[in-house]
Amino acid sequence: MRIEYDIKLGFKDVMIRPKRSTLKSRSEVSLERSFKFLHSPHVYTGVPIIAANMDTVGTFEMARALSEQGLFTAIHKHYSLNDWSVFSSTLPDNAKDLIAVSTGISKDDSKKLASIIENNSYLKYICIDVANGYSEHFAHFVRDTRSKYPDCVIIAGNVVTGEMVEELLLSGADVVKVGIGPGSVCTTRVKTGVGYPQLSAIIECADAAHGIGGQIISDGGCATPGDVAKAFGGGADFVMLGGMLAGHTESGGEIIEKQGKPYRKFYGMSSSTAMNKHVGGVAEYRASEGKTVEIPFKGEVKNTLQEILGGLRSTCTYVGAQRLKDLTKCTTFIRVNEQENRVYTE
Ligand code: 5GP
């Protein structure tokens, strides 16, 4: 047994220190970024925020709404081939560059991915997602997928340490998804004791990825626009959101009413709710590692987007970053023992 004594940080452990700035207004800040990739020849341009590939978040409706403002959606893996054809036939061209098709790593997943891509040849992004990206089998699957789809941008995860980010990039991933246990409906840390505070994971993994020309997505743990800013400040190229985008008109999940008020269900992809829905129950050898919650219905997602993008622009003006691209180099984190004043918070 070994102990690492360095304290690792989460979003709640830091704030961003304001700096002298020449920016006069938030409207001068550009949130758009362009990326070239390690393997794929494709070039990405957009606002690098991604709706998570959960069936309550990464929906076709979400993709339409997010793409209008240049944001990206990782479409969840549970749509049928027919659902895809209907969606694709009505998708505007500019939105086609802002979606990824998601897949697991089973034989069936791989077959389904092949038919979706064959029938929707505009698709350029593949998100290979497993709860634990540390298995050898996973890296093999990434390698295999790279050889089958040499031009696609491959997103692979999840991991939280630099050496595994490098291994996945060298196996053929262009972008590595980072986060184990920070998610709002995730119970991995409680059930297994495994995890890594998200901000430190971002800082360390971004450093490893950028060293060899790859990118990372910070996945999970953002509960406020301030957290999204901290994730970018820490070096994330993209930030993936689940809970912050759940509970909207465009989200998935059953709508229910409690005491006359509308709520929408939101659940982890390895919760018993998701497993009952998609694979006929929780397998005996595993515990569910996700929870199910009911969130007050939030209306159209565009209002939430405005809050997130407005917050991010404001962060940039506080530190003098004219472009989101400059935010990391303008960021100094201070370690803190307090966050917001909660006197008037319920
Ligand atoms: P959030 O933005 O809600 O904090 O986190 C979203 C992320 O949580 C997802 O993108 C995914 O990586 C992770 N996640 C989703 N469902 C589950 C689950 O059932 N268990 C665990 N451990 N993580 C989950």
Image: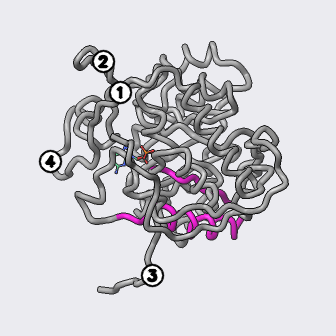
Mark 4 highlights which residue? 284
Secondary structure of residue under mark 4: loop
User: If the image is split into quadrants, where does the N terminus sit?
Assistant: bottom left
Q: State the extent of the magenta-drawn residues as a range.
A: 195-220
Please tell me whether mark 4 or mark 1 is closer to you in this view.
1
User: If the image is split into quadrants, where does the C terminus sit?
Assistant: top left
Q: Distance between the residues labelled 1 and 2?
A: 8 Å
Mark 1 highlights which residue? 296
Q: Which of marks 4 and 1 is nearer the N terminus?
A: 4
Q: Residue at x 19, y 44 (%)?
A: 283
Depth check, front residue: 273 or 82: 273
Give residue 36's position: percent from left, percent from top.
77, 51
Q: Which mark is residue 280?
A: none
Q: Do the residues labelled 4 and 1 touch (CB within 8 Å)?
A: no
Q: Do the residues labelled 1 and 2 touch (CB within 8 Å)?
A: yes
Q: Residue 261 carries which label?
A: 2
Amino acid type at circle 2 is Lys
Q: Which residue is drawn at 75% across and 46% down?
A: 33
Q: How crowded is mark 3: few (under 14 residues within 10 Å), some or many (20 or more)?
A: few
Give residue 8's quadrant in the image: bottom left
Depth check, front residue: 116 or 214: 214
Please tell me whether mark 3 or mark 1 is closer to you in this view.
1
Q: Residues within 10 Å of mark 2 (few under 14, many from 20)?
A: few
Amino acid type at circle 4 is Glu
Residue 225 is inside the magenta segment: no
Q: Which mark is residue 6?
A: 3
Q: Earlier in the sequence, mark 2 or mark 3?
A: 3
Q: In this view, does 121 lie to the left or right of 204?
A: right
Q: Earlier in the sequence, mark 4 or mark 3?
A: 3
Please tell me whether mark 4 or mark 2 is closer to you in this view.
2
